[in-house]
Amino acid sequence: MSRYALETAILKAGGQTQLARKINLAIDLMIKNGCYKDERPPLKVKQNNIWKWLNDYKGPIPPAEYVVPIEFAVGIPREKLRKDLYLTIIDTKIKY
């Protein structure tokens, strides 16, 4: 649900078109490595999909099925992209 995190991903990728290409490459690599054995992989994206996520999308952005490919593609942690889906892991050192 973080527009800021998606905008950061766009900047890290070098623009919306480059982010779309990197997402698609990440999806291809995830398919090749068996990450979608039990489910259908997300559809490929184009620049206009990313534009719609930023300007015209009625749900949380980015859509849930693209969070992990975006994380894989540009290194933005999934918990920053969608705080409603992923918890932030806090380093908890237990003292005895």
Image (tube, grey):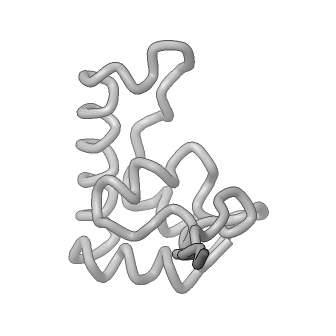
Q: In this view, does 89 lie above or below 65?
A: below
Q: Which of the 4 quarters of the picture holds residue 44?
A: top left
Residue 54 seen anywhere in this rendered image of the structure: no
Q: In which quarter of the image is the N terminus?
A: bottom right
Q: Quadrant of the C terminus?
A: bottom right
Q: Nearer the viewer, residue 92 or 60?
A: 92
Q: In this view, does 68 lie above or below 82?
A: above
Q: Where is residue 48 in the image (x, y as percent from the top left)?
A: 45, 60
Q: Which of 22 and 51 is in front in this view?
A: 22
Give the residue displayed 29% in from the left and 65% down from the top.
Answer: 74
Circle count: 0
Relative to residue 44, is residue 78 drawn left or right?
right
Q: Position of residue 12 (x, y in %)?
A: 26, 78
Q: Where is residue 47 in the image (x, y as percent from the top left)?
A: 38, 60
Pick out the residue farthest to the front: 96
Give the residue displayed 33% in from the left and 24% down from the top.
Answer: 31
Give the residue displayed 29% in from the left and 43% down from the top.
Answer: 26
